[in-house]
Structure formats: C-alpha cells, structure tokens
Amino acid sequence: MDNGYTKRQRERYVEVEKKSAEDEQLNRFWPHYRRKARFVVLLAQTLVCALIIAVIVIVYPTVPLEAWLLIAVITLIALASSIIAANVILRPLKDLSSALTHVAGEQSPLPPPNLNDSYYTRNQMRPLLKLIYDLAMAEGDGAAAKEDTASDAVSIDVKSELNHTQTGIVMLNPAGEIVYANKSAPVHIDANGKKTLELIFDVDPSIEDWLKERGEHDIHAEHSWRRIASKLTGEEGRRLYDVFVSYEKGSQAEAVISLFDRTDEYQPEDDDLDFIAFAAHELRGPITVIRGYLDTLNDELADKTDGDQRELFQRLIVSANRLSGYINNILNASRFDRRHLKIHMSELSIGDIYETIADDMQMRAVAQQRMLAVDLPDGLPTVAADLNSMSEVMANLIDNAIKYSNDGGTIEVTANVNGDFVEVTVTDHGIGMPANVIANLFHKFYRSHRSRETVAGTGIGLYISKAIVESNGGKINVKSVEGHGSSFTFSLPIYSTVANKLTAHGANNQDFVEHSSDGWIKNHGAFRG
Amino acid sequence: MAIKSILIIEDDRFIGEMYVRSLKKAGYDVDWMVDGNDGLIAARNKPYDVILLDVMLPERRGSEILQILRGGAQDLIPNSKVIVLTNFDQAEESRLAMEHNADGYLIKAEITPKKLISVIEKMDTGR
C-alpha cells in the first residue's frame, strides 16, 4: 500500500468517515431529540402516577373496582396530556432545527418554517428565525465564492464570464421560472419584472411542453431543437438558435437551457424565402390596381373606343394577367423549393380546371393572333387534382404554346384516358426544339438557345409545372420536332382509382403523393429541409 | 338575405378606392377603414352584410381581427360574410386558419372589382 495503510485499516477508515458524515447530518437531531424528550416526559409522568397509586393503596387498603377504573383513566389522560404539552413546548426547538436543516441544504421531511406565520410573531420567535435565514444567505454567498477559489487555481467569476459567451445560458427552477439567464440569452422581461424565454416554437413539443412531460416521467433527460427563432419573420433583432436542454429532477436549476446562436448560418436562406414572399406581395399590389382598373375601364369605355384602341386594351389586360401568372410561378417555385408546396385534392373534371382560365387564355390567344382550339370530350372521367395549381399548369403550357408558335398558328388542347389516368395534351405547330434541349427543359431557368433571343419568359414555368403535376400524382412529358412544333402532355389520376387513398389520408398530398410520384416530392408538412 | 352594407378593411389607398368606387357604383353601401384597429371597431359596431378583410394591415393584422371576431366561443358577427382579400403569400397554417373562419379567401391580384362583385352576388343568392 503506497500510503502505508493496510486494506483492512483503510476499510475501517472509510467506514468511520461514512458514519461520521451521517452523524453530522443536521436532520438527525430533531427525530432523535423528540424521541428522547417524549421518553423523559412519559417516564416522569408514569413515576408520579405510580407514586400516587402507591399512596392510595397504603392509605385505603380496600379500594373498590370503580375507583381503580377511575385511576386508570386519569393515568391515561395524564400521559396523553403530557405528550401534547411536550409537543407545544418543543415546537420552537423543532422549527429552529428545521430551519437550520433547510439552510444547510439537507433533505428534510418538514417544511421550512414560514417567517410570516403569526405563531412566530406571537412568541417573539420571528427574529430568531430571521437571523438564521439572513446568516445563511450571507454565508451562502461566501461559501460559493470560497468554493470557486478552492476548485480553480485561478479565481474565475463564473457569472461575468458567462456574459461574455455568445451561447445563451438559461436556468429554470422546478416551477419553470427563469432563475438565471446570461446576457446572450433571448429573455424578455415584462412590466412586472417577470422573465420569459423569447423563443417561438413552431414545432412540437415546445420547451414548456417538453419540460412538463419530464416532470412527470423522468429524472434525467436531454432534448435539442434546431433552428428556433426568437421573433417572427420580419421583426427586428430576430435570431435563430439551436436549443439544447438538459433536465435534472430535484436540482435547484432543474432545466439548463443552452442556446447556440446560428443566425449567420440560417439567416441567408431564411432571408431568401422571406424576400420572395414579400417581393411578391409588393409586386401584386400595383398589379391588383392595374388589372382592376383595366377591367373597369374596358367596360366603362366600351362604346367610346374604336377597334384599334380596344385591341390595345386587350394587350394591356393580357400582359397584366401574364405578369400575375409569372408571380404565381415564382411563389409556387419558392414554396416548392422549401418543401412548402401544398395541394388540396378534390374531384374535378378537366373542364373544371380549364374553365377557371378559359377567358384569360382565349384573350391571350386572340391578342397574339393565335387560334386556341380546346376539345375536351364530355365523357371523360373525373380526376383527383388541386384546382388552383393545376389551372396554373394549364395556363403555363398554353401560354408557352402561344409564345413558341407563329402568328396565325393553332394551339390544340385535347384530353383522353390512358390507363388509370386522364391525359391532357397541349400542341403547338411552332418552332419546336432539338432533342438536347428537351432533356433540360424542366430545369429551373432553362430556355432553348434559340428562344432566348426571340421570346421573353422566366424559364420557371415548366419547372414549377412539373413539380405541381407530380405533386398531384401525375406525370408531364414533351414531344417535339424542331421546326414543326411541340406537344406537352400531363396526366392526372382518375378520381375513382385514388378515391380510397384520398379519403384515408385526407385531401392533401402528403403520403399519397410520395407513393405515386417516384418520391420526387417528400413530406410537404415539414417546413425545414 | 339581401347584401347591402359592405365594410372594406384595406390599407392600400389605390386598392381601397378602387373597391369603394366599383362597389358603390354597383349600389352597395360601403365603409372603408384603413387600419386594423379601426376596422375591428367598425366591424363590431355595425352589422355589415359583407366584410372585405386584408391581411397585412397596420396596427392589427387581418388574421388577428378575424380571430377576435370569429375565433372565440361566440361568433361576434353571425350575420356577416367575411371575404379575406390578400396579396401576401401566407404560411399554409395561417392561411388555413383564416379560411376556416372566413367565407372566402381570394388573392387580390387575381380578382378585379367586376369579379369581386360577382363573388358577392353569388353569396347573396346563396350559391
């Protein structure tokens, strides 16, 4: 043994250590002393009773049975009342020891004495208790400081050091109140001085819910959240955090929350997304007024304009409508890119979808000297589709056909059944595309080298059309011969073939689409990707 | 019921004036409020047949107004129809919440005054 102790000696030493540690516990005093005090009181009382009985027996040798019973009852009452008296007399001692136990931080079955209890005021005992609590507080600070110096070679002021870190640290007591928060922590203080965590949990569970669960089930637990914002989008001073919580039941700081500021990493992406929604909002304002007044003036001036002016009006209206359509494409593409494109399936006919854009499309065709021939057979089965987004797809395809065909050209819109799907085909007899262009056609911002010079467009229409069609559970294809024109075909599932799945999953695309579109679009419910 | 009185809560002056002009021409009684607070007060003080509600409003958002009017235990405007008119691309959740409490949800840029009047007329005939 390096320190000279034998194994046995050491075991004894440890035993004694353990024993003395237990002996030094403050909470052992009260139960022990109460037992002793009761024993002494009962012993004294019993002794007195015995003496009295002895005297009675000596003076009156023939005591009747009734008297014996009486003596027994009186003895019992005497014993009981002495126990009660002892409790009353001992209460201050109990409270003082309980207060001392609590300030020492030991476990105690007794609640700490409440200074505001009138009992202490009545008995002039309040100052005594108050002194204990005050001393404990002063001592506590001193002890904590001493501990720090003892544990670290260099003295560190932990609190001030924590205020220098970028990581937010927050501690919650068992009641869920903030007992400590460093400078970097996003904490809001209201008018009453109540502190709350400034975090917006748009995911389940929130930190409160999670902690509530823990309080009921766990002793030790940890959980983390990614990308939690401190404020709503657009508000000043918005930060984005990864949040880590560790929970330790029974600690004074039951939950310790660490907040890692990841704003620099998350913000640019977030800004892009917000930028598009806000930009679209701004662009749509003037468009609303332009479209609104064009429509109004077109009606009100109908009998004052000549043929030429009427055509100018049509061109204005068509252009404004197109602009509006492009903004919808941009918004849809942005939603799709952040996996936020949601569609709501219902039972529709292809005619229902076309109906919503018919006037606009006819006007566009006429304004650009094209013939739009729409032939949707009556007997077609209904499809499962999202009306809004599918009408945008149809508008995109017809608009493209108008753009890439020649003056006086015809655009044909037809529909037919193919297996479990209804197929809609938009055909133009325009410039067409070479095979190498077709391969890239549905990519974002791709446009044919030739068309780039002759026609304008965002190159986003086909990209989002493919995304929407596939979200609806269909497919989109193109056939094209350079110099002879193109024909785009999209398919939508026949309603009766998917009605069961739709009702089982609700009328959104989540699970349904994942199975039917080669998994191209995944879980739209999740905002974050 | 015959739709007669219409409240417009809209902060864009051009858009607000455009709706007021067309709706008045079509024979409706129209009140127009520019900020969310005034809009909410007006909606609570007078029983309008139709309320046209914007979302991005100063003082109080349209979603908040709708929540106060229709979101509680009691519908505070049981005899009014609410049409949400917005150009803002709301998050799916807030859009669904508003649609739930409204009788219509339309993108302003897609709706000309003429179309808006036809929507209101359709509501009137109970279709």
Image: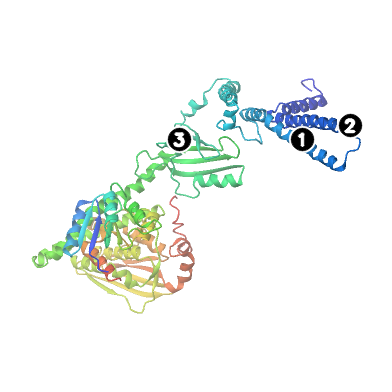
User: Where does residue A325 sit, x and y in percent of width and height?
Assistant: 27, 59
Closer to us: mark 2 or mark 1? 2
Mark 2: secondary structure: helix
Same chain, marks 2 and 3? Answer: yes
Please tell me how crowded label 1 is: few (under 14), some (14-19), or many (20+) other residues with Cα within 10 Å. Answer: some
Q: Quadrant of residue A368?
A: bottom left
Q: CA distance from mark 2 to mark 3?
A: 86 Å
Question: Residue drawn 40% across and 64% down?
Answer: A472
**Residue beneath disc 3:** A185
Position of the N terminus of chain A by quadrant? top right
Please tell me how crowded label 2 is: few (under 14), some (14-19), or many (20+) other residues with Cα within 10 Å. Answer: few
Nearer to us in this view, A207 or A134: A134
**Residue beneath disc 2:** A59
**Residue beneath disc 1:** A78
**Chain name for mark 3:** A
Closer to us: mark 2 or mark 3? 2
Q: Is residue A484 visible?
A: no
Is residue A186 rendered to the left or right of residue A369? right
